[in-house]
Each structure stands twice: as structure tokens, then as C-alpha cells.
Image (tube, coloured by chain):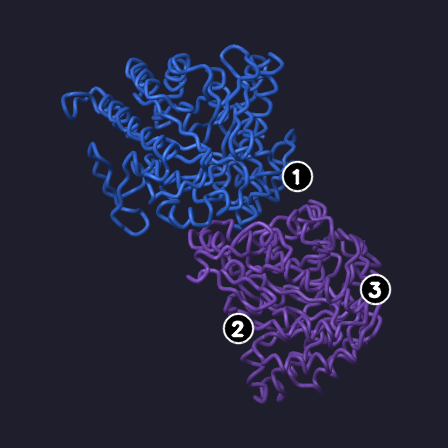
Chain colours: A blue, B purple
Amino acid sequence: MKFEVTNRDGQARRGTLTTPHGVVQTPAFMPVGTRGAVKAVTHRDLEDLGTDIILGNTYHLHLRPGDALIARAGGLHKFIGWPHPILTDSGGYQVFSLAAMRKVTEERVEFRSHLDGTLCALSPEKATDIQSQLGSDISMVLDECVAAEDGDRRSEVGESGISRVRAAMERSARWASRGRRRFLQLRNDPASAPDVLVTNPGQAQFGIVQGGTDHDLRTESVQRTREIGFDGYAIGGLSVGEPVTVMYDVVAHTTPLLPDGEPRYLMGTGMPDDLVECVARGIDMFDCVLPTRNARNGQLLTRNGVLVIKNLQYAEDREPPDPACGCYTCRHFSRAYLRHLYIAKEMAAAILMSVHNLYFYLDLMRGIRDAISFGSFEKLRSEFHQTFSRRQCST
Amino acid sequence: MKFEVTNRDGQARRGTLTTPHGVVQTPAFMPVGTRGAVKAVTHRDLEDLGTDIILGNTYHLHLRPGDALIARAGGLHKFIGWPHPILTDSGGYQVFSLAAMRKVTEERVEFRSHLDGTLCALSPEKATDIQSQLGSDISMVLDECVAAEDGDRRSEVGESGISRVRAAMERSARWASRGRRRFLQLRNDPASAPDVLVTNPGQAQFGIVQGGTDHDLRTESVQRTREIGFDGYAIGGLSVGEPVTVMYDVVAHTTPLLPDGEPRYLMGTGMPDDLVECVARGIDMFDCVLPTRNARNGQLLTRNGVLVIKNLQYAEDREPPDPACGCYTCRHFSRAYLRHLYIAKEMAAAILMSVHNLYFYLDLMRGIRDAISFGSFEKLRSEFHQTFSRRQCST
């Protein structure tokens, strides 16, 4: 993997990330293809939208259809028929948010599958092995995720007399070290792990900075993660319920501490204004389920804010969702028709609204990249905030 | 509307049907867009598949969002953003199969909406008015549909001392006369019906031949329907549970009685082999929910028969659904991936399998039209039956 920063505008950077399956233009937004498909759209739609890279969830793919089956098919790219870059998460976030019964030890985390209750376990080595079998272009190291409520109670003193957030950060650093060691073993000496089918020898691995909303813990986490050394660095443990201003502060504190020459990925974020604000603070990569999940719930994201399609005011509205938008949905369909489809529970509602929301995100990132090239990012940022609101649009 | 038969091969005919929204190549298959959307696909997918014409359901659109709302938007084409030909049914079939509480009188049929129990009524005039507001290119006259079980008990003597099937056929003929009169009134003197918004002045109207499986009743129904005179003729009341050989016999009996210069539409049929067999008996147009409904149920139609994707044998099958098929799904995805999507209940499963099944139907019709042009329809027919089976494929 090769990362090159080509333009800078303040802290914002434009660059290219070259992977074994193609080039990703950064700052990039990665649609989430949880189980090997971005919900309600086809790969053809994603290509038409200009998607450079998608994200796959290791937890879901490990449970079903299984990484061994995917490896036998030649890896995730071949299995799902997506020839472009893929990033996989470590599975940790889902284990800590979705699985039933979790038992975390220094060695590993045990959990029961949310599908059928099967007892499973994930260790730093196992998370690396699974992603090696999936053969994503970018794999993530396993970290210990602290739940949002734990973050709120971070003054509490828990195990070993230190705060839960510090304990998770420190364990994440130790796990990162083990995950990296395993990754380098699979890269340099795959024969030493005959049970692991390495389907993408050019796979990269990112470390994850933890530490909640505590700047000192973030600083320490960056130091320990950099010492290990990764191909890129993610900021984890944000967008978990804290106020956005706190998130922005943590990002602003953390990015200058990260190496300048490696990509920086803010995990699980966020609303469109979060993307603009975090690019301004030096982030290169984002992922979030929000555009597709909101689409399925009838919420269209537009440059004026959130349009709730079921509202009666749209029953005879012949305007497209966003008259200034160039997506397939806005070029062809009215709010009235989309409202009808949504109320009738037609699958086309989810498809067409997902196409719009993803286009809105990807087009925003295109605009951001252009603005950085032309040194006009601050202009884009202030114009964006002049129209965008998180509240419902009135029109 | 203009219909021209351009090629003949036995009873099979190839032709062009010119409507206000474009030309339909016949024999044609019409995907069913029940509520203004073909389930699980977008209009873009339909265009890519080579769809000339879709069908909309008057019953569903009348109940929600309402034909008056659609008329205010400029008609169904504009409301749903489909600029190509549309045929609408009369609503009768759904009233007789879907609605709760039906009361049929000579004047009209009263029923309760399956959505919310609202008391509604449909008469020959009302069915014409609704379709006039929808502005489809081809509208259908209201007929009285005899349920399949009534067809089985057609020896029973019911109202007025005549069989249920005869009674329904006779009432359908009287209703056809009223429907045609209303249609001509709206066409020739729209000012006389100020409450009806005629959104497509070039709309055509088809009559429907009834009479169950009784050849004499079919003959009489054709005579009475031809006497009224329509722009095209449909065969209704088939594919309602009778054996296919009986259906083929009724079609073979009926089509030679219909005018040669008008299109012939077999309503609600059917399996791929039905299409081949009924083209051989002189049918020009078909519609059926089968390709999209079966897709959502995980059944792929291929030239070898029905492939049930959930079967364990496909878990690691890297072949496309049909290696000889040129559709988007078969060009890009394996049975193993589609099985994974189906089992994980991903919407992409319904999308990709609907695309395949619709392509299979539309491509079959393309092949049939070509064969008729080249005088090789019988060759196509026998080759089709050599490989196609209604049973599950073994591979």
C-alpha cells in the first residue's frame, strides 16, 4: 500500500491511497457493506456513484458464510464480485455492541453469536487471521471497545485500580502489538501458519488509537500505537454518544500526533457536517452506516438538512429530493413518488433513497477533494454550514 | 394505437405495437409494477433489461396514492417517472382475489379495501375513469372474474338458472359494453365528464374474453366482445388453477376466433414454457408476477429449470446462476454469493435475482421474436423444451 498526500489546505489533506485493488482518492467515504453487500444497492449502483472503496464487517462475515469458505472462493473480492478496494474492520466493535454474553480476558474475548448463540472467541491473532483469509486491502487490528456509557463513567475506578477507559486503551495497545506481530508473520512467513489462507499478500494493516475523550490517554495511545508501527492509523472509540464538539476536540488533538505520511481513518463517523469538520482536522478516511440506514428509514440527507419523506407535505410534491443533486434518484423521481413507495413499503423506496444518500456523501467528498486542490476548502466549509442543518428541512 | 404484424411462423406472430409512449415489440412480456414500481428493481434496471412496457395495477393505485393524485401529477408515467408504455388492468382481478367482502350486482362490485377496510365500489364506468386518470397507454375493460374454485364447480347451477361461468361471461360482456361506451365518451367528448382528468388522450382499450374452460362459452364471449369492438383483445380467466394442457387448449381454441389485425393478450401467464406454448398459439402479450415473486422467494428461472438458491449444494458453487445467461447477475455473481445474500436476508438477493429472472423472461421473448422473423420458431420451441423443466435443476 502506498499513500501520497498531493494537496494541503490548512490541516485538510488530499491524497491517493494505492491498494492491490486500485486507487482510493482521499478524503474518502467508505459505504458499509456489512455482510458483503451495501444494503439495498448493487455493486453497479456503487460504481455508478463513484465508490472507490467499501467496508466489510469481519464479525458478520466470520459468522456467516465464514471466512474459511470465503478464502476457498479466493477471498472477499472474488466471493462478492467487487474488484475494487475493501477495508475490513476487526470484528471487535460488533463483538462489544452486538454479540450476547461477552467475557474479556487478556488473551481474548469470548462471545456468543447473535445469530444462533454459538460460543465464539476473538483474539488479536484470530482477528488478523480472519481478515487475512478475507483478503481485504486494509485490515484493522483488534481493539477493546469501551461502551459509550463506560466512557461517560470514565472517572470510575475499575479493574486494577485504573479507569475503564485507560484499561481498555492499554489492553488495546498490547493487543495491537500482538495483532501486528501476527500480521507480519503471515506476510513474511505464511508457511509458518498453514491453517491460514492468505488471499491478498498485499494487504495493509491499520492500528487504532483509543483513549475515550481524555486527551492525555489519546496522546499515550498514539505513542504506543506509533511505536508498534502500522501502515495507517485509525481513531476509534468516537461517535459513541459523546457531544460532537467533544469528538471534534479529540480529533483535533489526535491527528497532529499521528505520522504525516500515513492515512488517518476516523471510524464510524458520521453526519455530513462531521465529515467536513473532521477533514478540516486532518482526517483522510470515513465510514458510516448512516446514509444507507437513514435511507431505509425514509430520511433523505440533502444540503439543506434531513428530509423525512413520509411527511404529508410531500404527498403531491413534484420536486426531486434535492433539486441541486445530480444523483439518479433526483434526476428522475419526485418526493411524491418516493413518499408513495415508502408508505407502500416498496423495496424501490429503500433502493432509490440509499442511492441518493450515498451520492450525497460521495459527492460531498468529491467537492471536498476539489476544494483542497484549489485551496478553497474553508470556503466550502463555511458555505456547507450556511445551508446544512441536522434538523428536518422545512421544504 | 397502431398494431402491425410483421412476421408469421405458423400461428406465432411477430409485430410492433405503437403507443403514445413508444413502440412495444411483440410477442412481449410485461413486468408487473403493481404499485408503480416493479418489485426490487429500479426503472434503470428495467431499461437495461430491455423492458418495452410495464403493467400497473389499477386496484392498488386507486387505493393508494389514488388516481386523482396521480392525475394531478400528470398521469402515471409522470408520477412514477417511467416514460415508456404502460398497460393498466381494470382492478377487477384484485377486487375478486384480494379485497375483503365483495358484493356483486349488475350495476357494480362493492368491496372493502384490503388496506384499511374502506368501503369502495368499482363499476365498468368507474374502472374506465380511473384508468383514464392514470393515463396508461392500454387500459382494460372491467370483467367479472370467476374464482378458480368456481371454475372447478362450473357444472353447478347458480343465479338465474345458468352456470356461474356462463353468468360471469355474460355479465362481463354487458360490462364490456358499458366500459367501452364510457371509454368512447371520454375520448370523444371529455367535456361531458368534467370530474375525470384524461391524462393520456391516446389511450387504447382492450376487451377481455371470458368463459372459463368451456370452448362454447369462449366462442360466445369472443363474438360478443368483438361485436362491441376494442383496440385489442385479452384472454382472461386462465392461469387460475386449471391444468396447463387445458389452458393451452382454450388458448388454441380462442385465438383463431380473434381478429387477426389486433393484439392478443393472455392475462396473468405464466411459466416460461407457457409463454413459448402460447406464442405458438397466437398470443402477442403476456404479464406475470412470477419472475419477480419467485426471485424474492429464492427461485431462479434458468433454461434448465428452477434453481432453488438456498439449497446447501450451492454454498460453495462458484458458477453463476445460469452460465449461458448474459444478465448483470450472471455476468458478475456466483450461486454461492447469491445463496449467502438470500440466507442473510440482504435486499441485494431480491434485487439480483429479480434482475436475473426478468432478464430470462425478456431474453426468451427476444429469442422468440427473432425466431419468428427467421422462420425458426418451431426449432426454438423444441430446443426450449429439451432443456427446460418446471422441476428443480439438479445442477
Q: CA gap, disc 3 to disc 2?
A: 37 Å
Q: Would residue B175 be seen by someone viewing this image from the given angle? A: no
Q: Amino acid at mark 3?
A: Phe
Residue in the picture at 58% in, 80% down: B242
Q: Would residue B52 be seen by someone viewing this image from the given angle? A: yes
Q: Nearer the viewer, residue B126 or A248?
A: A248
Residue B147 % position (x, y)? 57, 76
Residue B274 % position (x, y)? 64, 73
Q: Which residue is mark 2?
A: B391
Q: Secondary structure at mark 1?
A: loop
Q: Residue furthest left?
A: A161
Q: Secondary structure at mark 2?
A: loop
Q: Are marks 1 and 3 on the same chain?
A: no
Residue A318 numbered mark, or none:
1
Q: Are marks 2 and 1 on the same chain?
A: no
Residue A315 % position (x, y)? 59, 42
Q: Which residue is mark 3?
A: B3
Which one is in front in this view, the residue at disc 2 or the one at disc 1? 2
For this view, does B78 lie left or right of residue A62?
Answer: right
The chain carrying label 1 is A
Q: Nearer the viewer, residue B328 or B198?
A: B328
Is label 3 in contact with label 2 (beta carbons under 8 Å)?
no
Q: Earlier in the sequence, mark 3 or mark 2?
A: 3
Q: Nearer the viewer, residue B342 or A127?
A: A127
Q: Residues within 10 Å of mark 3 (few under 14, many from 20)?
A: some
Residue in the picture at 32% in, 15% down: A223
